[in-house]
Image (tube, rainbow, N blue to C red):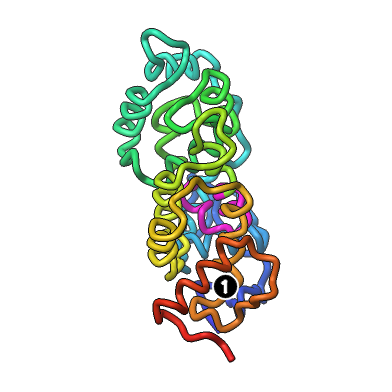
Amino acid sequence: MQTVGSWSCSSGVFWRCYYRLPSPGTDSTSGELGTSHTWWDEKVALQALKASDWHLEGAFDIFYSQPQVKAIPDSRHLEELYNRYKDPYVDMILADGISLLCNDLQVDPGDIVMLVVSWHMKAATMCEFSRQEFVGGLQSLGVDSLEKFHERIQFMRSELKDEQKFREIYNFAFGWAKEKGQKSLALDTSIGMWQLLFAEKQWPLVDHWCQFLQARHNKAIPRDTWSQLLEFARTVDSTLSNYDAEGAWPYLIDEFVEYLIENGIFQKSS
């Protein structure tokens, strides 16, 4: 049983399903300012607490950084933001503009949160934002200023802790990172993306997987292998104790298991 503030949870199930929080602008200790309060339901509270590693104050911060009742962003401000980053010769935001955006947001360009930003913008290609993608993404986030954009970064980072959103972001990354017109994802790009994504999920076999691909595969990665690897990492124990050789895994994952056994990393199950 784990207890956090007034929350009690066992195996991820909250026994108390609602927590009364002061609305922004109230005294966070007394919650008093008229009768304005916010009620969290179980799903929202669980996500915020997980994202803050079960620290209640951190959960407050994440909650208040989320888009609440979204004000309609000012279209003029959205255009000003877009024009700040737009390429001078093409009606797109390209690598230089994204580098400037990262600098303004005080985020490293290689930070995984920029993948989450691209997911919100439904970007078709890495290192590019069309006008529609950029403006539409900011509208969906309720953002029309750099200050508001910066405030959303913590919320977007917390979304990686949500299993369903992580799955969506993971699957989005395949199409986003591959070259235009290609059906598969280049191996070096795949490895870089897996190292980024599985560092977040802390899959202990990711380095072995990448070494296996470089030693035995050395080809582009198809979408089926990309999507099934997340399921493998999620459901198969890191010692392979529950791996089913008769399961419907892509051949590359089955070969990976054989590689681990051949190299003495794990012993074959009896």
Residue 194 spot, x, y in % from top left: 45, 54
Q: Is residue 204 visible?
A: yes
Relative side of 229 to 187, left or right: right
Residue furthest toward the bottom? 270
Quarter in which the N terminus is drawn: bottom right
Quarter residue 57 falls in: bottom left
From the viewer's perspective, is residue 73 above or below residue 234?
above
Mark 1 is on which residue type?
Answer: Trp
Residue 24 spot, x, y in % from top left: 51, 46
Q: Residue at x 41, y 16 (%)?
A: 86
From the viewer's perspective, is residue 152 above or below residue 35?
above
Q: Residue at x 42, y 14 (%)?
A: 83
Residue 11 spot, x, y in % from top left: 61, 79
Relative side of 232 to 156, left or right: right
Residue 240 spot, x, y in % from top left: 54, 79
Q: Is residue 58 visible?
A: no
Quarter in which the C terminus is drawn: bottom right
Nearer to the camera, 79 or 256: 256
Nearer to the camera, 189 or 135: 189
Whether residue 161 appears in magenta in the rendering, the answer is yes
Mark 1 crowd level (few <14, some 14–19, many ≥20, 10 Å Cα):
some
Residue furthest toward the top? 89
Magenta-colored span:
155-170
Q: Residue at x 46, y 55 (%)?
A: 217
Whether residue 214 appears in magenta in the rendering, the answer is no
Dot 1 lies on which element? strand
Q: Which residue is mark 1?
A: 7
From the viewer's perspective, is residue 5 above or below residue 170?
below
Q: Residue at x 58, y 68 (%)?
A: 254
What kind of secondary structure does the magenta stretch mostly adopt?
Answer: helix
Nearer to the camera, 125 or 85: 125
